[in-house]
Image (cartoon, coloured by chain):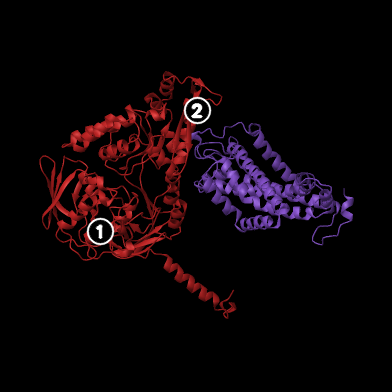
Amino acid sequence: MTSITSGRAVDPRARPASARGRRWWTPGTVIAAGVLTLVAAAVLAPGLLTGADPQATDPSASLQAPGAAHWFGTDQLGRDLFARVVYGARYSVTIAVLAVLIAVVLGALLGLIAGLGRTWVDDVVARVLDLMSAFPSVLLALVLATLLGPGTVTLAVAVGVASAPGFGRLVRRQTMAVRHADFVRAAVTFGRSQGRIVAEHVLPHVLTSVLLLAAIEVGTALLTVSGLSFVGLGPERPAPEWGALLSEGREVLTLAWWQTVFPGAATVATILAFTVLGRRLQRVVSARGLT
Amino acid sequence: MSLRSLPLRRPVPIVALTATALLLAACSGGETGSGGDTPGTGGSLTWAIASEPSCFAPAFHQLVSDRAVLRNLVDSLVHQEQDGSFTPWLASGWTVSDDGTTYTFDLRDDVTFSDGAALDAAAVQANYDYVRDASHGSTYATLLSSVTDITAPDDHTLVLQLSAPDTSLLDSLSSVALGIVDPAGLELGDGLCDPTTGDLSGTGPFTVADYSRGDHVELVRNDDYDWAPESAGHSGPAYLDSVTYSFQSDDAGRVGALQSGQVQVISGVPALQVAGLESAGLTYQNGPRTASTFGFVVNADPANAPWDDVRLRQAVRDGFDLDAIVQAVYAGQVDRAWSWVGQDSAGYDADLEGAWGDDVDAANALLDEAGWTERDADGYRTRDGERLSLAVTYDADSVRDQRDTLIEAVQDQLKTNLGVELAFSTPTWTEVSASIADGSWSVYPATFGKTDYANSVLGTWAGYFYAAGSYQPTAAVEAATTALTATDHAAYTTAIDAVQTDLVLDEAVFIPLTESTFQVATAAEVHGAGFDPSSGTPDSAYGVWLGRS
């Protein structure tokens, strides 16, 4: 596969396609992969990481500082904060991933319609995508989440719809490029149906860049999800979603720093891990000339 | 560095310094009045409050907290004291007929409205007649529902004729809701809500000077004021030149504003911040526990089955350790409640203390007896495959003072101790009020504010929460009716005790959680801030003065 690269014009901004650019493992990616492994474990099998019940209250152990018994300390009701952060991953990360899936599907659909449709269809869809992109996506998600009401699924839908335009524009651009390629023209000449052309030729070409963008977008979506949950638009309490934990912690910030710092650190670490790995993936793939 | 080596050619920092100094001077509203330890006239301060008044007209305001601001603008006929008794205010005295149905008030003859008009019996009559006429849409028409006729035989005599004795009448007359305004403005109706029109004219110690919606209202002293109630501690005009109420909804923001000196007084202090405020030399005051308490109002109607079974309601009431929960959530700054009636109220029934709560074994026995003996995979009790679940809906806008945290603690204890699921959600008020209107509601966490308890049982319980269903807390309603028309104190007390026993012990349709109070914190130089016994809210700024910090 690497042989393709040699035939390409060199983009002066891009790093040289050296061994370093193509290498997977850098210290950053190793740490990021470690973080994501922990997060994945927390999502899939939180019981492996902690034996404590994230909902079990113990008023006599209210607001205890981090220590051997409670690694991240306890909250006002004496709940183990480590357990809450671990179990919270299931909410935060799942909602973020779900949101990105929704964004990918919706964006791909709109992008394909625009890229393959007649000129006026493209004009309409492209303008809608432009309009949505011009509107800050956090604000759009906030508006949608307010309209749909608080909850796990509605939050994923709100964030997903709000980040769909990015994917829509990407897919449209890629589709446009592909539709005039010789092999697509050839397929048209041979009388392939539009559906088959999309499935066999257009989608595979578009897919790589969409997945690369999706990897990075999970981090952004996680930030938006936590933000909206922070202002009360997330899952119903007492679900320990990270944004909700931050919001609870804010009320006792002067008394218990741990209740804000640990959920915040978990959020930041996960977002950074997704972003670092996503960017690395992008660099490796472009160095290997897969897009 | 010697003075000469300073770069004198650059005047910019000096200008900047001067500007900063001016800015600082402008920001610190708390200029000292007398500067001593005794009350002195002068100065002004900024008072941060959580909610902007919903309306400045006494007859149309909607939030109890509005009264803290409105009390500056209007006076009442009688004054309620800390012990619940009543003393002269705009009325210099009054007599009650032996049958308790005729009240004759003598009015002061030296009172004027802020627009210069004199206060006479006709003016008071016009105010009361306006409010009690339901067609005017005042929120407080029911306060005067026992009044059949009002007459003003001469300029300074007012006679109220009642259909039956009414133990709540003086309480109502002392309220901000029946504060007296110049009748010239009455015809504007709720148009009087907007203080910028200049039509709102009361007899209070302050008048509105400037109002900026969403930001602040500035009040200035009424220099003619000379009719404060005797218990106010001083007479004549207020000490302060002006007071500015600044609207700051964020709890932490208000505390920060006080700590940094941007404001001198705040209302509404989060319990967990109190220790920090006191260690910083600021004064914290918790108001009287005269309001009805905060707790779960439970729907006992068959529409909310299986919770129409009193055994289940009693089991939930006794299935958690309220003392431990309240201590954890409020760090000792808020008291747990025992009754629906606040502990500092005259009608409080102390017999309820220790009579219920935190009896997990008895609660489990009640649930077993009611047939909820099976358990599902999550550990919740079931009967015929149905999970024992109690839905608590609390409209998101009303959630404050960490009451959601409190409910989460109850939720976990009910699960662990009893195997009862408490499904807690915070929908919009539109949804909640619709479910109450059609009777499909389950549990509403409520506080009723400072209220006449007998009136409230009839109006709020029978007339609102249980209006749609077939269930009624019959014993409480009967006792409340007795209390309302009682002619002697003993009969009143017995009846109000019976109301509490029925709601909390026998029917368990109210599960008390915490005492509901207002709080005030002040900078060290501010003195004389207190609470208005008629509403439990922070009092007007009449007695507030600036001294040495």
Q: Residue A196: where, in percent of width, then height? A: 78, 44
Mark 2 Cα-neighbour bin, 10 Å: few <14, some 14–19, many ≥20: some
- State which quarter of the image contains the N terminus of chain B: bottom right
Q: Is residue B307 above or below residue B326?
A: above
Looking at the image, can residue A43 be seen?
A: yes
The chain containing the residue under callout 1 comes to B
Residue B192 in which image quadrant: bottom left
Q: Which chain is red?
A: B
- Extreme-bottom residue of the structure: B9
Q: CA distance from mark 2 to mark 1?
A: 59 Å
Residue highlighted by disc 1: B187
Q: Residue A175: where, in percent of width, then height? A: 75, 52
The chain containing the residue under callout 2 comes to B
Mark 1 Cα-neighbour bin, 10 Å: few <14, some 14–19, many ≥20: few
Q: Is residue B449 above or below residue A46?
A: below
Q: Residue B493: where, in percent of width, then height? A: 22, 34
Q: Residue B483: where, in percent of width, then height? A: 22, 36
Q: Residue at x 18, y 36 (%)?
A: B486
Residue highlighted by disc 2: B416
Q: Is residue B6 above or below residue A283?
A: below
The mark total stands at 2
Looking at the image, can residue B331 be seen?
A: no
Of residues B42 and B51, the one drawn nearer to the viewer in this rendering: B51
Residue B54 in which image quadrant: bottom left
Of residues B3 and B495, the one drawn nearer to the viewer in this rendering: B495
- Classify residue B179 as left or right of residue B374: left
Q: Say which colour chain A has.
A: purple
**Label 2 amino acid?**
Thr
**Label 1 amino acid?**
Glu
Q: Earlier in the sequence, mark 2 or mark 1?
A: 1
- State which quarter of the image contains the C terminus of chain B: bottom left
